[in-house]
Image (cartoon, helix red, strand yellow):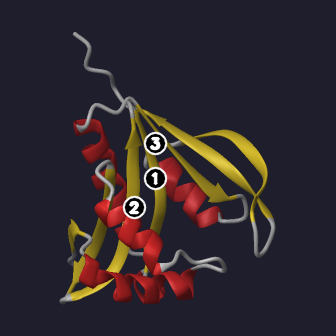
């Protein structure tokens, strides 16, 4: 499927929320997405196909670290590599902003996401006990080291 990665705008939030609510047991609120849109060091992006939002990714930067906060593809468009492309796009943006490492958390039972992040170069760092609620579950903390350009 052809899609473009674009800035998330305030008018995108209702469509993003509809995907969020069918994808997670503890979905983000509209306020959380709006906060990401307006935070200076946040990178909220959407994937658009055929004039509709079919996925999104939110990340932010703290000093030289990137943090991927949320990656989601509409259930009807999963399995086509869209999430991996959004991850790779975000890695490139964070690298351009001089990040040297990127972290993320993922439910330990989300095997498809774990495999996707590994394909993107992330490696398991540790397990954080009872990180998630509804249902309570451990998180796998993953890390991607970026090449440092300190020549």
Q: Look at the numbered disc 3 and give the secondary structure of its residue.
A: loop
Which labelled disc corresponds to residue 58? 2
Secondary structure state at the residue bearing disc 1: strand
Q: Residue at x 55, y 88 (%)?
A: 22
Tell me which corner region of the image, top left, top right, bottom left or bottom right, holds residue 77.
bottom left
What's the mark number on residue 1? none
At a point 44% along the width and 84% down the height, the residue shown is 17
Can you identify the residue that label 1 sits on?
68
Mark 2–mark 1 distance (CA, rounded to whole Å) = 6 Å
Q: Position of residue 11 (x, y in %)?
A: 25, 84
Asked if the residues shown at circle 2 and circle 1 are in contact, with their CB atoms under 8 angstroms apart, the answer is yes
| Among the two numbered marks 1 and 3 on one chain, the one whose residue lies closer to the N terminus | 1
Mark 2 or mark 3, earlier in chain: 2
Secondary structure category for the residue under label 2? strand
Whether residue 115 is visible here, answered yes or no, is yes
The image quarter containing residue 113 is bottom right
25 and 39: which is toward the camera: 39
Q: Residue at x 45, y 90 (%)?
A: 18
Picture residue at 45% right of the left edge, 75% below the top: 31
Mark in the foreground, 2 or 3: 2
Vertically, is 78 above or below 113?
below
At label 3, counting other C-alpha atoms closer than 10 Å, the crowd grade (few under 14, some 14-19, many 20 or more) is some
The mark nearer the N terminus, 2 or 1, is 2
Location of the C terminus (image quadrant): top left
In the image, 79: left or right of 113?
Answer: left
Q: Are the two marked residues, 1 and 3, in contact with CB atoms closer than 8 angstroms? A: no
Q: Which quadrant of the figure has residue 49?
A: bottom left
**Neighbours of disc 2 within 10 Å: few (<14), some (14-19), many (20+):** many
Quarter of the image with the N terminus is bottom left
| Pick the front one: 151 or 33 | 33
Q: Which residue is mark 3?
A: 121
């Amino acid at each position: 499927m052809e899609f473009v990665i674009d800035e998330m705008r305030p008018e995108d939030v209702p469509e993003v929320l509809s995907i969020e609510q069918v994808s997670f047991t503890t979905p983000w609120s509209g306020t959380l997405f709006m906060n990401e849109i307006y935070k200076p060091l946040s990178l909220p992006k959407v994937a658009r196909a055929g004039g509709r939002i079919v996925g999104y990714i939110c990340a932010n930067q703290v000093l030289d670290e990137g943090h991927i906060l949320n990656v989601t593809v509409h259930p009807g468009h999963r399995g086509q590599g869209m999430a991996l492309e959004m991850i790779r796009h975000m890695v490139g943006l964070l690298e351009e902003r001089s990040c040297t490492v990127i972290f993320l958390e993922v439910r330990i039972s989300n095997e498809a996401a774990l495999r996707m992040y590994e394909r993107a170069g992330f490696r398991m760092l540790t397990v954080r006990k009872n990180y998630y609620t509804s249902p309570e579950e451990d998180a796998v903390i993953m890390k991607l080291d970026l090449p440092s350009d300190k020549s």
